[in-house]
Amino acid sequence: MKLNNYNEFDVSLKNDMPDPDWSEGLKALWFDAKGDWNASHDIAQDLQTPLGSLIHAYLHRKEGDKFNAEYWYRKAGTSYPKISLKEELKKMVVSII
């Protein structure tokens, strides 16, 4: 299922699994939004892309590991965000869809 906006992503969280046709990045964010940090991290650490690094950074920021998060934000080519985690998640999802 192709998503058209963040609201549709949010509604998809009632499902047991993400859509199998989604990108790995979107699946990683879906698992995080569902509360499965480990599943999200497993996907993100295998994504050898700037998006994978950004998701990885976000996840370490979420767990409170600022040092590790800063490393991954640099690797993604961005700085440590000043927005909330919720806003950052939404921004990443919207950038993918």
Image (tube, grey):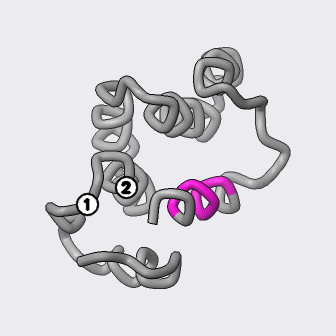
Quadrant that contains the C terminus? bottom left
Give residue 22's mark: 1
In the image, is residue 77 above or below residue 71? below
Q: Which residues are magenta?
A: 88-93
Measuring from the top left, give residue 28's x and y in whole percent: 35, 48
Q: Which mark is residue 26?
A: 2
Amino acid under disc 1: Trp
* Overall secondary structure of the magenta section: helix
Whole-number angstrom distance, CA of label 1 to CA of label 2: 6 Å
The residue drawn where x is 37% and y is 59% is: 30
**Is the C-beta separation of discs 1 and 2 under 8 Å?**
yes
Q: State the residue in front, 28 or 50.
A: 50
Q: Which mark is residue 75?
A: none
Q: Tell me, yes or no, whether the highlighted magenta stretch contains residue 51.
A: no
Label 2 neighbour load within 10 Å: few <14, some 14-19, many 20+: many
Image x and y of residue 16, in percent = 19, 70
Foreground pick, 38 / 71:
71
Q: Position of residue 13 (x, y in %)?
A: 35, 74
**Compared with residue 16, is residue 43 higher up or lower down, i.e. above or below?**
above
Q: Is residue 91 magenta?
A: yes
Secondary structure under the numbered disc 2 in the rendered image: helix
User: Residue placed at 44% from the left, 33% from the top?
Assistant: 52
Outermost residue to the right: 82
Compared across the picture, whether 79 is left or right of 76 comes to right
The residue under the point 39% across, 84% down is 11
Asked if residue 14 lies left or right of residue 51, the reply is: left
The number of callouts visible is 2
Which amino acid lies under the numbered mark 2 shown in the image of this protein?
Leu
In what quadrant of the picture does the N terminus appear? bottom left
Outermost left residue: 20
40 versus 17 height, above or below: above
